[in-house]
Amino acid sequence: MTTAVRERVLALTSAELPAYVYDLAALREHAAAVRSALPDRVEVYYAAKANPEPEILTALAPYVDGVEVASGGELAHVAKAVPDLPLAFGGPGKTPDEIAAALAAGVSRFHVESAGELRMLAHIAARAVVPRRRVGVLLRVNLPVAEDALRGSALSMGGRPTPFGIDPSEADELVRALSDGEYPPLELYGIHAHLASGLGAAAQLAVADSVVTWAVRLAERHGVALDEVDVGGGMAVDYERPADRFDWKAYGAGLARLTAAHPGLRLRIEPGRALTAYCGWYATEVLDVKSSHGDEFAVVRGGTHHLRTPATKGHDQPCVVLPVDDWPYPWPRAAARLGRITVAGQLCTPKDVLARRLPVPRSGLRAGDRVVFALAGAYAWNISHHDFLMHPRPGFHFLGGGDTRGGAGDAVSG
Ligand SMILES: *Cc1c(COP(=O)(O)O)cnc(C)c1O
C-alpha cells in the first residue's frame, strides 16, 4: 500500500468506510513505466471497461494513444472525460443507434465483430454526416492460438466457439469486399484480435506474433497493405502473488523485434487490468469477529456488492490489516483467536466472501481494525452489483490528482 493510501484510510471515520482509494500518482508512474518499456511504434489504447472513472482516464491520458470503448455508454462517457484522445469502438452487439452515435462523434476506428455488423456500419456510414472522411475498420478475428501459449490464462475468448470476432474462414471474403470497394465509406485499416486474458509476457508475445503473421499473410493473399494490427489486451495481473507484475520490459523488447520485422506496420495493444488494477484499494473496517463450526469469520462493512472481483474470479482478494487501537465501547473487542480467518461482507449470501482462510497477522485482527484490499483498481466497483441489499455506496478518493478536479488538490466524492 502506498503511504498516501495508508494515511487516507486511517484518517477516515468509520462512517466514511468502506471507501475506494485511488493513488493517481502511483497510476501515472506505472503508466509512464509501461509506456517507456514499449517501442515508439507500438500504440497503447486503454480498455475503458477495466475502470472508466474520469479521474483514472485523465491520469492515463498522457501515457496512452487512445481508448477502446465497447458500448455507446462508454463512448459518450470517455469522449466527455478525455475529449482529445482517439477512440476505437469495439465489442459485440453494436446497435444501429450506437454506430450512428460513434460516427457522429468522429470515432476513428471500428473493431468490426461480424459480416452483419460490417454491412450495418457501411449502411449507416453511407447515410450519416460523418465528420471524418474515412471510416476506419479493423476486422476482429477469432484466431486459433497455440495451446501452450494459452496455458494458465484465466479467460480465453479466442480459438474456440465464442460470440467474439469473425471466424477466420470468413475473413478473406470480407477483406476482398472491402478492398473491392463494396462498402464505399469504409476503409480497411487492419486486423484486431483479443484472444485471452491473464497471459504473461512470453505468452502474450507468442499471441502477438501469431496474430501479426496471420494478418500479414491475409494481406499478401489480397495484395492489400495492412497498416495496423491490434493484438488486444489481457496482460496478466496475479492476484495470488501481487508483487509478480507483468514483465513490460520483456514484452516491449519482443514487440520491438516484431515491429522491426514488419516495418510498415503499426502495432497496437489495448490493456485494461494491467494498467489500473494496482492503483486502487478498497478500504473497510471489521464489524464483527466470530467463530462458526470450527472456523473464524471477520465480517466487514461492505462486501462483494462493492468489490465483486474475488467472487467472479474465484480468488482471495489480497489485503492488509491496519490495526486501530481505539475501541469506544465498554465491552471487550471480538478478536481472532485462530491462525486463519475468512473475511466476509454484509450480504445475506454465502457468496459474499472477499478472502478465505487468510493467515491472521501477528498483530491480530479485531473488531474495529481496518482491512484494505489491494488490486481493486480494475474490474472492481464497476462490475459489482451495488444495489443488492441496499447498503450505502462507498466513498471515492482520488489521491495525488491535483490537476484532475479543478486543481484543488485531492478530490473526494461519494
Ligand atoms: C476486456 C478487453 C480488453 C482488456 O482486457 P484486460 O484483460 O483488462 O487487459 C481489451 N480488448 C478487448 C476487446 C476487451 O474485450
Image: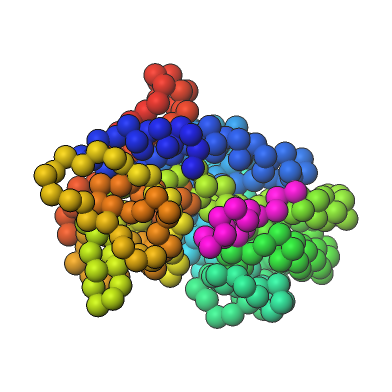
Taking the view exactly as shown, the residue that stands out farthest to the left is: 330
Q: List x then y, in percent, for residue 385.
A: 28, 59
**Of the pair 392 and 291, the residue shown nearer to us:** 291
Q: Compared with residue 81, is residue 329 higher up or lower down, i.e. above or below? A: below
Q: What is the x, y in percent for residue 289? A: 24, 59
The percent coordinates of residue 125 (x first, y second) are: 51, 51
Residue range corresponding to the magenta coloring: 235-249
Q: Within the magenta stretch, is there residue 248? A: yes
Q: Is residue 394 visible?
A: no
Residue closer to the observer: 259 or 256: 256
Q: Nearer the viewer, residue 270 or 360?
A: 360
Can residue 242 be seen here? The reply is yes
Numbered disc total: 0
In the picture, residue 182 is in which quadrant?
bottom right
The quarter of the image holding the C terminus is top left
Q: Main secondary structure of the magenta part?
A: loop
Establish if 34 lies above or below 273: above
Q: Residue at x 13, y 43 (%)?
A: 329
Q: Is residue 14 left or right of residue 5?
A: left
Residue at the location (54% across, 70% down)? Answer: 155
Image quarter for residue 224? bottom right
- Residue in the foreground of this view, choosing between 407 and 22: 22
Q: Residue at x 46, y 32 (%)?
A: 4
Q: Is residue 292 magenta?
A: no
Measured along the vertical axis of the image, is residue 10 above or below residue 140?
Answer: above
**Position of residue 102 in the picture relative to residue 342 (left or right):** right
In this picture the colour scheme is rainbow
Could you tell me residue 1's position as x and y percent? 49, 42
